[in-house]
Amino acid sequence: MSAASGTAVWFAQHEWRLAWRDWLSMITAGRRERLRKVVVGIAAFFTFMHVVASWMVGRYADAAIDKQTLIAVTATALLSWLLMISQAMESITRAFYARSDLDLILASPVASDRLFGVRIATVALATTMMALPLAAPFVDVLIVLGGWRWLGAYGLIVAMGAAASALAVALTVALFRVFGAKRTRFVAQVVAAVIGAAFVIGLQVAAILSYGTISRVAVLQSDTLLALAPDVGSVLWWPARAALGDGWALACVLATSMVMLVAAIAFVAPRFGDYAIAAASAGNSSSAVVRRPTAFRSKGSPRSTLRRKEWVLLRRDPWLMSQTLMQMLYLVPPALMLWRSFEHGSGALQLLVPVLVMAAGQLAGGLAWLAISGEDAPDLVATAPLPAGFVLRAKIEAVLGAVAVVFAPLLAALAIASPWHALIAGGGIAIAAVAATAVQFWFRSQARRSQFRRRQVSSRFATFAEAFSSIGWAATAAVAALSFWLALIPAVLSLLVLLGAWLMSPRSRDA
Amino acid sequence: MQHATTPLALEIHGLIKRFDRPAVDGLDLCVRTGEFYALVGPNGAGKTTTLRMIAALLRPDAGTIRIGGIDALADPVAAKRIVAWISDEPMIYDKLTPREYLEFVAGLWSVEASLAAACANELLDWLGLEPHADERCEGFSKGMRQKVALAGALVHDPRVIILDEPLTGLDAGSARQVKTVLRERAQAGGTVVMTTHILEVAERMADRIGIIARGRLIAEGTLDELRAQAGTQANAQTRDAASLEDTFLALVAEPAQAA
């Protein structure tokens, strides 16, 4: 049954239908006949995650509400919340700038603030719905082993989703006012990525600071932190207490987050149309003037022309550059580790090598997608009088060149600390970069550069193959730093991943 | 008007391309050097597929394509050297300026730098792009983007220009400018092959018109010759006054009825 047109419920139905179809299309990669397989795959993965969760958190099921538990739960929730804020900011920015149906809505005689209110609420719902399946295995295990009190964790996730969305709305609007419509998209996406990266970096930093202890998060149990932390009765612990089954704390946390969300909707929804119009106007503003080149540079070979084009396009697109180089944020923990190694002369360099190799694989994968699949003028390049494979070789050179530029300084610093580790890391970086590029080459499919963020849903297999290959080469490098011959085992496994990727790729069927 | 003795710029025989169904089905087509040839046909007739095969963007299932005497399937690189392709959706780089775009295209075609620079300046001026030559293309209108793509196609001085619906979405001023450029190019000895849905454009600009339906060339010639071919099923009065639209509809109706 359909609600009266123009009402908030009617808009909610409209949004729900769009979101559902979008989600279906995303998980099935646009092929509805795959749905059954996808559901079976998700169920298998979910079951597997429950096993992993029982191994990871099972022993904490009976944890008492003391300072140490509250610190651990709060830190986990805080890091997860950062990820949710990042996700919500992305969604809100997209809602401002995506033109899809805004013209239609703003030109219609309905009160558009109702739709925008619904749209913000949808962002909150989507943010929560994305967090729930990730957290569910852990919460389920805690409920089974520790009792119903852990149901409060689900309530906390709902509250975190609402509060994250409210904060994301406030942050985005603040950026809109400070930076203006033209720059907000870029700044908001960078801020969102930095906040999101903070989650992973936070975990790694905690692990690094705990290096040498049995627990990876020993820093959260240190005496210093315990001494600095507020008393168990403090309001700051309410979210953690809510997760641990304190009904009163859960009610307060839920109420606060809902008030935040309603306030954000009430404040922003009536102005949403203005922001959207300003964003659209910014999109049509005149383009940047580039300094006129002194000479026409077509002296180089077609290969150097292609390489130069890739580098110029990357350099001139701050959004793409930020999306690509954002992965370099993950190098902050290794840098910290390097610094600690210089300071204490510890054996932590052993851990640095795989992180560098992993980061190189991920960076190369992103750049390779941009260069190989994200060609905005494919017809032009395809009709150029160049032999088959020539263009691809030039693009691959551009990718590997960029990776080399990024990692050379880190390798140089590492070489000062330990030439052996630098050598192993250098080899691993080169292999991981080539492997990730190869995966992108095998799974290449034409797309616009602006679809960079969708690359991971266009071929799930390529995404997993790229990730597992990088992990495999990282492991190989880590083991190689200890024993060269032992490293053959992960190396063979990594090669098998690549072989599997090639066999599953459309290119192998063409061959 | 080109004579039958003029060398052929494009020669296609028995061209076949199938997707789920035959898109191009045994097409034979010849275009003479210096000729302006328009390919018209209903939606899904196989026009774009044909042009994409000529531009080496699609590989035919069967048939031969010779461009300027070069076997384009056996030696695609040599054929590409003398061909330029422009699609209905101009594909240019948003983050490059028109001047940089031309520099890039000249680099791909290995055009000598000083020659390319002079040609680029001339084209930018000719197409009215000079004031925007050092602005990034991201804010350009469709007409301006099409002009940048056209300049890119001309900067390497191709002997054959292939265009797929080049006037779609252009305003009257931009469309006239593009038409003028193409006409001048043909008059200067270049060969232009283009598809269009705007029959008036084909009628006014083309030396010869080919009508394609269901992947086959069903009629070809000057407007008068097409009228004569269509006249087999029209009376004399309508035949003499028939526009290309009438002629086109009469010609494409026949295979449709036959099917």
Image (spheres, rainbow, N blue to C red):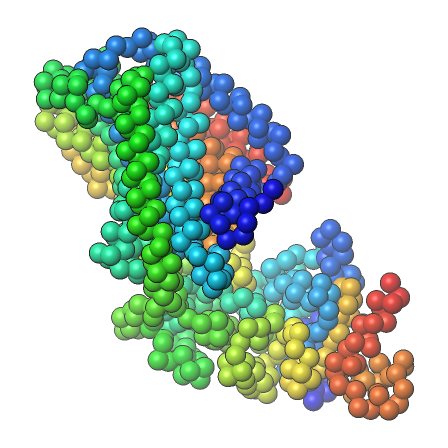
Tell me if B197 is positioned left or right of B140 in this view.
Answer: right
* Foreground of the two, A149 or A397: A149
Say which residue appears at 58% left-offset and 85% top-offset: B183
Tell me if A178 is positioned left or right of A344 in this view.
Answer: right
Say which residue appears at 61% left-offset and 70% top-offset: B164
Say which residue appears at 42% left-offset and 11% top-offset: A144
* Foreground of the two, A232 or A81: A232
Instruction: Tell me residue B204's x, y (percent).
Output: 66, 86
- Residue B110 seen anywhere in this rendered image of the structure: no
Q: Is residue B244 above or below residue A465?
A: below
Tell me if B213 is positioned left or right of A78 in this view.
Answer: right
**Quarter of the image holding residue B158?**
bottom right
Q: Is residue A334 above or below residue B167?
A: above
Say which residue appears at 59% left-offset and 81% top-offset: B190
**Quarter of the image holding residue A436?**
top left
Tell me if B218 is positioned left or right of A82 in this view.
Answer: right
* Foreground of the two, B66 or A435: A435
* Foreground of the two, B70 or B214: B214
Q: Is residue A262 above or below residue A484?
A: below
- Residue B205 seen anywhere in this rendered image of the structure: yes
Instruction: Tell me residue A64's x, y (percent).
Output: 25, 10
Instruction: Tell me residue A40's x, y (percent).
Output: 58, 25
Q: How many marks?
A: 0
- Identify the image quadrant of the C terminus of chain A: top right
